Image: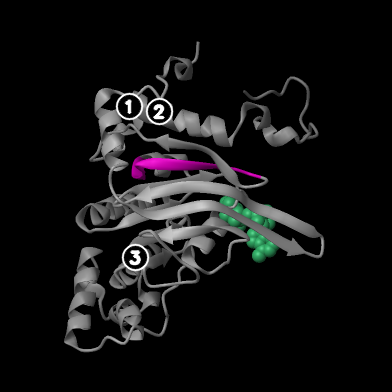
């Protein structure tokens, strides 16, 4: 019998976990997605990237979205941010229908998007300035956000003088400086090495804990999703639709030591089952020609 077979079912919630999610769902809904669909037209035909998505994100919830490559994660976040228009359905922010981009939604992308010709502080002040705010109050606020992401010593540095992790911390500060209702993050740590990535996850949880922000975070990393999320929205591909919404039973505050706890492993195992179904595992059906001698086997 494998170790996995002895894991508990993540859906069998303890009373404490059930209570945690009951309380979460009593909070006001910040983002409501209703019947959302997106079809792209091209010369080769049409692609239905998303179909009939319905879900709510509650105030100060940390929701992760996970799914195979091409299942529509980036399309979803681009629609939520207003960069793309849905083909059907609607989005409500604090109960009001939204169309197009707005400062109520902050974005952090995987690629580094800081303005290279501006310093850290100028990058963070950019949004408030565009909104017509001026004066020392804006500068002081920018300094607070920079302090929040631990970069006070670098406020006058330029992006090229920063590491990848530092750039993403500035990107988070810049998004938060607009005081959005929700932070939309598309694989923001995807380009970082494993150690920096783990540090950034811890940083982000600390920031989330300390300010009134709701987060929707896209990832394809199972551990990242289980470590960060209250709930994980698992998407199925072709067309992109909701497969399951997982309520993560792992208690907070989270630590890397929990990665060997049964509820952590059970949750991760369930996501793995959903996004890598058994029938799709094992080399993806590709026949590899043998180029070694008989008897020259490896395990
Ligand atoms: N502008 C576009 N025009 C045509 N098709 C598109 C466009 N953008 C996305 N698609 C298609 O929509 C589907 C979903 O793409 P999307 O980029 O949202 O996937 P994803 O889940 O973010 O993938 P990944 O994990 O690789 O980032 C894919 O089949 C993709 O080819
Ligand atoms: Mg993507």
In the image, the residue with mark 2 has its CB under 8 Å from the nearest atom of ligand 1: no
Q: What numbered label is drawn on residue 261? A: 1
Residue bounds of the magenta highlight: 227-237
Q: What numbered label is drawn on residue 265? A: 2
Q: Residue furthest top?
A: 1
The reply to whether callout 2 and callout 1 are in contact (CB within 8 Å) is yes
Instruction: Specify the quadrant that holds the C terminus.
Output: top right
> What percent of the width, then of the height, locates residue 187?
47, 55
Q: In this view, does 219 lie above or below 21?
A: below
Q: What numbered label is drawn on residue 172? A: 3
| Res 251 seen here | yes
First in residue order: circle 1 vs circle 3: 3
Q: Residues within 10 Å of mark 2 (few under 14, many from 20)?
A: many
| Res 220 seen here | no
| Residue 196 as seen in the image, left or right of residue 219 | left
Q: Is mark 1 on a helix, strand or loop?
A: loop
């Amino acid at each position: 019998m494998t170790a996995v077979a002895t894991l508990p079912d993540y859906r069998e919630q303890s009373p404490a976990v059930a209570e945690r999610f009951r309380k979460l769902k009593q909070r006001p809904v910040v983002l409501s997605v209703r019947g959302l669909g997106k079809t792209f037209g091209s010369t080769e035909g049409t692609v239905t990237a998303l179909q009939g998505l319905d879900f709510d994100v509650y105030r100060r919830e940390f929701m992760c979205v996970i799914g195979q490559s091409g299942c529509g994660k980036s399309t979803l976040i681009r629609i939520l941010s207003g960069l793309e228009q849905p083909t059907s359905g609607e989005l409500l922010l604090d109960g009001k229908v939204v169309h197009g981009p707005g400062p109520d939604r902050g974005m952090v992308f995987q690629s580094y998007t800081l303005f290279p010709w501006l310093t850290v502080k100028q990058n963070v002040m950019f949004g408030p300035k565009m909104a017509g705010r001026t004066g020392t109050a804006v500068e002081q606020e920018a300094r607070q956000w920079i302090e929040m992401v631990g970069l006070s010593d670098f406020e006058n540095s330029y992006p090229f003088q920063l590491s990848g992790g530092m750039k993403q911390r500035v990107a988070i500060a810049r998004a938060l400086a607009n005081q959005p209702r929700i932070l939309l993050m598309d694989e923001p740590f995807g380009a970082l090495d494993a150690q920096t990535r783990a540090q950034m996850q811890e940083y982000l949880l600390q920031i989330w804990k300390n300010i009134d922000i709701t987060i929707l975070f896209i990832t394809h990393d199972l551990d990242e999703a289980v470590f960060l999320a209250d709930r994980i929205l698992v998407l199925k591909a072709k067309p992109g639709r909701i497969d399951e919404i997982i309520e993560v039973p792992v208690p907070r505050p989270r630590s890397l030591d929990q990665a060997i706890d049964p509820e952590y492993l059970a949750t991760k195992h369930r996501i793995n089952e959903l996004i890598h179904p058994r029938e799709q595992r094992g080399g993806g059906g590709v026949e590899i020609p043998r180029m070694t001698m008989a008897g020259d086997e490896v395990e």
